[in-house]
Image (cartoon, rainbow, N blue to C red):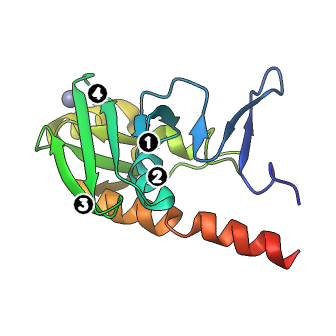
Amino acid sequence: MNLEAQDVIVRDSQTGRIIGAYPFTEAETGHRVDLALQALNAMCAIDALGIGAMYDRDVRIRSSCRMCGTAIEVATLNRGRELAYWTPETAIVWSGIRYEHGCAANSLCKVLAFFCSDEHLAAWRQRQGEDSRGFRLSMEEGLETGRAIFENSLKANESGAVAT
Ligand SMILES: [Zn+2]
């Protein structure tokens, strides 16, 4: 199985060194996730929101508005399946649909981000011009999307390992 082709492993485009195993990366992405006693970098906002359900525990996410840098914090309840709180209350998730070179971590994820408000999402989209297509998600919708992608991914890997 080619992990890279399946978008699981991410390599530095210059050195070829492995810099991430989805959904985590060594690179400073600006999406810090506190999981148990570790602080990890998630590759994007949706990944950060899905990690709790994936690992069956609650997480706290510390990120920032892509437009202005305002701190955004999100915490989960019920082992990553619900939101405990998020600040500021107007914070939202942008799910951009740009996808290049077949690698989510190097392209799509860069346009999956948190914004402090609809106003700042609108301002950022205006600045991006043609590349700004995508979906505006509430924080709840962002969590649902992250869960949909990651909640069963560990189980799927385990059953896949048994089958082969
Ligand atoms: Zn902002």
Per the image, label 2 sits on a secondary structure element best described as helix
Q: Say the numbered circle drawn on residue 67.
A: 4
At a point 43% along the width and 42% down the height, the residue shown is 36
Residue at the disc numbered 2: 51
Q: Say the numbered circle drawn on residue 140.
A: 3
Nearest to N terminus: mark 3 or mark 2: 2
Q: Name the foreground residue: 133 vs 140.
A: 140
What whole-number distance in Å separates the C-alpha atoms at marks 1 and 2? 8 Å
For the residue marked with disc 3, what is the amino acid?
A: Glu
Q: Are marks 1 and 4 in contact (CB under 8 Å)?
A: no
Determine crowd level at label 3: few under 14, some 14-19, many 20+ residues with C-alpha closer than 10 A: some
Residue at the disc numbered 1: 35
Determine crowd level at label 1: few under 14, some 14-19, many 20+ residues with C-alpha closer than 10 A: some
What whole-number distance in Å separates the C-alpha atoms at marks 4 and 2? 24 Å
Q: Name, please, the residue furthest toward the left.
A: 89
What whole-number distance in Å separates the C-alpha atoms at marks 4 and 3? 21 Å
Nearest to N terminus: mark 1 or mark 2: 1
- Dot in front, 4 or 2: 2
Residue 26 position, x and y percent, is 61, 27
Q: In this rendering, does residue 115 appear at all?
A: yes
Q: Ligand 1: does it lie within 8 Å of the C-beta at label 4?
A: yes
For the residue marked with disc 2, what is the amino acid?
A: Ile
At a point 34% along the width and 29% down the height, the residue shown is 127
Indicate left or right for 99 with 117 as reference.
right
- Dot in front, 1 or 4: 1
Q: Are marks 1 and 2 in contact (CB under 8 Å)?
A: yes
Q: Quadrant of the C terminus?
A: bottom right
